[in-house]
Image (spheres, rainbow, N blue to C red):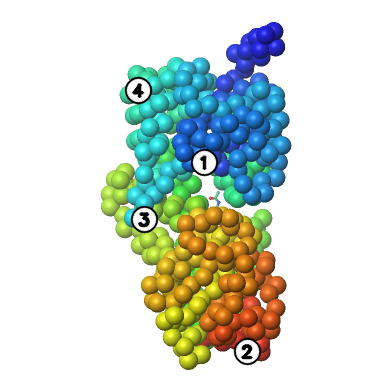
Amino acid sequence: MYTELVIYIQNRMMEKIVVIGMGYVGIPAAALFADVEGFNVVGIQRRSKRSGWKIDWLNTGKNPIGGDEPGLSELIAKVVKKRTFRVTDDFSECKDADVILIDVQTPTDEKGVPHYESLREVSKEVGNHMKKGVMVVLESTVAPGTTTNIVKPLLEEESGLVAGRDFSLVFSYERVMVGRLIKNIVHLPRIVGGIDEESTRRGVELYEHIVKERIYPTDSLTAELAKVVENTYRDVNIAFANEVALICESLGVDAFKVRELVNTLPNDPSDASSNPLRDMHFPGAGVGGHCLPKDPWLLKYGVDTYGKFEVDPIVIVKSRELNLWMPTHMADLVEEGLSEAGRKLDDAKIAILGVAFLENSDDTRNTPSKPLYELLLKKGAKPVLHDPYVRDFDVPFTEDLNAALEGADAIALVTKHKEYVTLDLNSLKTQIRTPVLVDGRNVYLKEDCEKAGFIYKGVGKPH
Ligand code: SAJ
């Protein structure tokens, strides 16, 4: 009883942070803040079918995030044991919170329109409970303009308080990546955008507790733009590489050799002004993941919705469309290879290597393998998906590589898993019925494949 009382009093004296949304952004942020002297953190997670189980897992000190995330499991166990981190589904925990982080999902539909149902619902709940003087920080990726046009009015309506005067409001985005959740929060620079100077100051002060790199203060709209532009920049650069690949295929040149030569221009970031920087990205079978396929549409939605005049972002939209088209190009290469082998797509067994969107990972979000699979199916082929890391996916797949390869009429490599890089081409030849190999990630040498008796096609490779 005495210990409980002491802990209760201690917690009352600490700075209380509430983190809403126990996902791959909220959990590491909550754990890091809970490890700061004087901070007491409460995570809020809906008891939904999909994610409700995380509440009990986290409260027993277990890490619900799969894959290898260095330092995260230990940190969760430590702060739960220290009693400075616990999780609930009860929004009334926001009542006495000094800081509230909103880390909920902000998905976009196939037309790129963001679905803010959960952001709106959470903003209302926070507004309902929050106290005067609180700082609300939106960490989720949103369309530029969302903080002041959607979150702010909801918080004000529900609370009767005025943003800026009665409470602070900040947008500060995460730069987490699979396998580096903790590392990226602590060791990447942080952008902090307040709706006013005081909000920005408080936001910077908060992140100084956990971020070891430079913190860049700005306003919320500039910060929202920086986030989606950061990923759109990468998507456009990948599309550029893919367009160069198509040009090289048509002219019979290896695009990866062109990339190598282009990037020989001196790349000395320390003296970028005097160096003509080039950083041509890699052509490939398509662009998957949680960020790149979504953020360009959030950027477009923001300017379409809140822009003062009409802008037609053709470079961004065409780049996105080209990246979305790359799985179709892969299917064309398969069809081309088969016809050279005297076969049609009809009834041909195609082994698609890789379901994950990224090499040596089990993450399947927006993987280009899925549209390739569906297109081949539609064209009458019999595609079989293989992946050594993925455990569940909404399309049938096998973990047995030999079963996928047995009697195949073509192999289409989509993901550069290390297991595929070391495949022996000669033994591969004995396993398949028709020796067609389509390389979506520049894994194999055309010469080696042709020496082993394959008809080799590749994204960015001479036909
Ligand atoms: N890809 C290419 N060519 C390239 C690079 C990537 O086709 O040159 C493809 C990959 O195969 C994959 C997709 O694009 O299918 C996305 O790859 P990614 O390396 O961008 O991985 P993501 O989606 O995890 O991107 C994240 C982003 N980080 C955040 O949003 C915080 C991105 O901004 C980072 O640049 C990226 O990680 C990174 O550098 O690892």
- Ligand 1 within 8 Å of disc 4? The answer is no
Determine which quarter of the picture holds residue 4.
top right
Q: Which of marks 2 and 1 is in front?
A: 2
Query: Gap in Å between the C-alphas at discs 1 and 3?
Result: 23 Å
Query: Gap in Å between the C-alphas at discs 4 and 1?
Result: 24 Å
> Dot 4 lies on which element?
helix
Alpha-carbon neighbours of circle 3 within 10 Å: few (<14), some, or many (≥20)?
few
Q: Mark 1 points at which residue?
A: 173
Q: Name the residue under label 3.
A: 110
Query: Gap in Å between the C-alphas at discs 3 and 4?
Result: 32 Å
Residue in the image at 70% along x and 78% along y: 424
Alpha-carbon neighbours of circle 1 within 10 Å: few (<14), some, or many (≥20)?
many
Amino acid type of the residue tagged 3 in the rendering = Glu
Residue 32 horizontal side relative to residue 106, left or right: right
Residue in the image at 59% along x and 20% along y: 15
Mark 3 or 2 closer to N-term?
A: 3
Residue in the image at 58% along x and 36% along y: 27
Determine which quarter of the picture holds residue 73.
top right
Image mark for residue 453: 2
> Dot 3 lies on which element?
loop
Residue 143 horizontal side relative to residue 443, left or right: left
Mark 2 or 4 closer to N-term?
A: 4
> Dot 1 lies on which element?
loop
Image mark for residue 158: 4
